Image: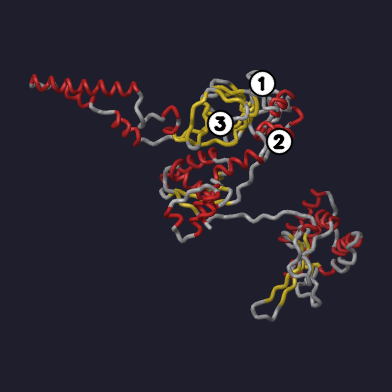
Amino acid sequence: MTEKITKSLNINLPPHITKSRDPRAILTALFSQWLPLSTALLVSVIESLPAPPVAQEGRLPALIDASPGATHVDPSIRDAMIKSKSSKDDPVVVYVSKMVSIPESELPENKRRGGTLSPEEAREMGRRKRAEIARAQALEENGTADPVDGLTDALSRASLEEVTKEEGKQPNPEHLIGFARIYSGTLSVGDSVYVLPPKFTPAHPHNHPEPQRVTVTALYLLMGRGLEPLTSVPAGVVFGIGGLEGDVLKSGTLCSQLEGSVNLAGVNMGSQPIVRVALEPVSPADLDKMIRGLKLLVQSDPCAEYEQFESGEHVLLTAGELHLERCLTDLRERFARCEIQCGEPIVPYRETIVRAEEMKPPTNKELGRGTVIAVTTSKQVSVRLRVRPLPTEVSEFLGKNSAAIKRLYSDRQAEERGKKIDSIDDSSEQDDIEDDNVAAGTQILSLEEFKKQLQSTFEGVKGQRDVWTNAVEQITAFGPRRTGPNLLIDATKESICGRL
């Protein structure tokens, strides 16, 4: 079967593959020659995805309308971006999605250090070698040696490789390069453009902080991990840009004009980090290194965030566990260059609000939604708890009469302690209640009046009158903090929790 397939597809498999007993190895080799992944992916992109100009014309109107102050965007800028115009007369709009940290040795202008020698460097090295040989022969013939000449010889014998090794021992500083795409116009080295902050709006272009002009110092073509220098880039190109360090923190928009410009950095397209971990250096002396490294990491990674709490704890927030591992590796090896220990990752639990019909069905249909039953270890006591949302009218009534609820609690405490309300401690509490009541502009209700008005509020709720029939007489506590608009209702026959 394998030979038949290979002959029909005109594929030649190596003998050690055809003789293998592992069918997975044979299938992998067969598919890699018949339909390589790179070719299949490229063909799928060409056949399935629209052309870049067509895709930009379909996507950008919605992107521009979602930006801050979209109604004040200059029509010429909107038209140039949608149609991807690349003339020198068209406005320049560039979106910098993130700042990438590149070691200094990997920049194109520093690539020759430690690599292939240029013709000028090779001629200079040959000239030095010939001068050393001629000087050594002259000293042997004369039989004399000047100490100054000996020192000069020792210094001149320092080859280019030794100098390169000494330079390699020095720390390799990092430089931030903007990862960007140009949407309209043509950007060249030496051009001056405005850097729009994330909160910029074209409705008020001169508001504080007013955008500043920066000069483009370098342009790079991103070739995998390598960088190729460029002199200019037209619309539609994804490229690297130098000269933004200190002006762009994470992301930003570059524009050739200030009035009517579009703020693409104000469009919220990123996800919030969900994993947080506390960091500290192994050696306390490396704390400054770790802080500098964290700030550089946050600038180079748009999905990472750094916070310092009042307690002095340094926390790194990442998008996931794999992202956290990558950030810690970069922090130890590139940015901080010191040993760092981290605590246990913490993932915050979050909830959201959905419509009732969109909720998941209850786990136990017999109990209904919001009801749970718990049994003690001794199996002698079972607790049934049901959670139900209060009507809006009742919540508003409880919020307005928080002073009355405070007074009910103070009266109950006075009765339990056997003290009078006009005692020193309770009088101070009573003064606080009256102060709160005066600030709220309401009158403190008595217990009977409070129950009466609360009962009438329950009865005035449409569609839920039967649910809250005896709720007022079964109230045990208020919450949170004994004054909030939450009720704990004791529905047991014996009233084991007590009632107001």
Q: The residue under label 2 is which amino acid type? A: Arg
Specify which label sits upstream in the sequence, 3 or 1: 1
Q: Is residue 36 left or right of residue 421?
A: left
Specify which label sits upstream in the sequence, 2 or 3: 2
Residue ID for mark 3: 239
Q: Locate residue 58: give its quadrant.
A: top right
Residue 59 numbered tag: 2
Q: Is residue 410 visible?
A: no
Residue at 64% x, 56% y is: 349
Q: Position of residue 450 (x, y in %)?
A: 86, 61
Above or below for 33 versus 486: above
Q: Is residue 243 left or right of residue 436?
A: left
Give the Cα distance between marks 1 and 2. Answer: 20 Å
Tell me the element at label 2: helix
Specify which label sits upstream in the sequence, 1 or 2: 2
Q: Residues within 10 Å of mark 2 (few under 14, many from 20)?
A: few
How was this image coloured? secondary structure
